[in-house]
Image: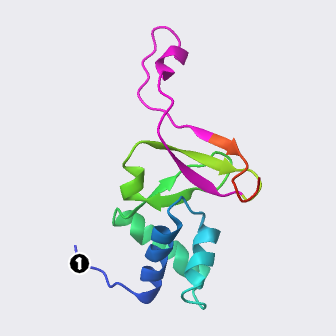
Amino acid sequence: MTPQRQTKQLQAIRDAFETAGRPLAIEELHELAARTIESIGLRTIYRAVRRLQEDGVITNVPVPGNADRYELSSIAAKHHHHFHCTACDKFFDIHGCPGGLNKLVPEGFKLEHHELTLSGLCDACA
C-alpha cells in the first residue's frame, strides 16, 4: 500500500479527535476542524473520515436511530461504554463496566458481547 499524504486538513481532523477525547459526530468534527482551517468543507470531512477508518485510525460508534459517531481506534480498542447527553446530543466515554450481565441473559443463552449507552444530561447541560 502506498503511503498517503498528510494534508493540513487531515491533520486538523486528527487533531480534533485528539483534542475532543470523545466520540464525535460529523458535524462536531467539522466544527472543530474549522477552528484550525476555516475553509474546510463537509465533503473533506467525510473523505477524511473514510480514509482514517480505512487506515485504522478511527472506528465508528453505532448510535441507534442516529448517524454514527467516530472515535480513535486506540480508545475503541479498550472496553468502555458511552453516555449520551439528550440536550446537546454529544457522546462521552464511560470507563468501566457494570459487570454481572450474565444474570440478565435467558437460561441456555451465551452472552458474547454487549454495548451500554447511558442517557441524560452532561455537566454543561445539567
Local secondary structure at mark 1: loop
Q: Bin the neighbour count of mark 1 within 10 Å (Cα to Cα): few under 14, some 14-19, many 20 and up.
A: few
Magenta stretch containing residue 92, yes or no?
Answer: yes
Residue 21 vertical placement versus 97 (above, below): below
Give the vertical position of 125 relative to 3 (above or below): above
* Residue sitting at x 62%, y 69%: 28
Q: Amino acid at mark 1?
A: Thr
Q: Position of residue 107 (x, y in %)?
A: 49, 8
Whether 115 is among the magenta residues is yes
**In the displayed structure, does residue 64 sit left or right of residue 13?**
right
Q: Is residue 14 left or right of residue 27?
A: left
Residue 26 pos. (x, y %): 59, 68
Quadrant in which residue 2 is drawn = bottom left
Viewer-nearest residue: 36 or 26? 36
Residue at left offset 68%, top offset 47%: 65
4 to the left or right of 67 = left
Q: How many marks?
A: 1
Q: Which residues are magenta?
A: 89-117
Q: Give 29 or 85, whichever is nearer the viewer.
A: 85
Q: Position of residue 106 (x, y in %)?
A: 53, 12
Q: Residue at x 56, y 46 (%)?
A: 82
Horizontal and vertical percent position of residue 70: 51, 60
Residue drawn 45% across the image and 9% down it: 108
Residues 77 and 20: in front is 20
* Quadrant housing residue 52: bottom left
Residue ID for mark 1: 2
The residue most toward the left is 1
The quarter of the image holding the N terminus is bottom left
- The majority secondary structure of the magenta stretch comes to loop
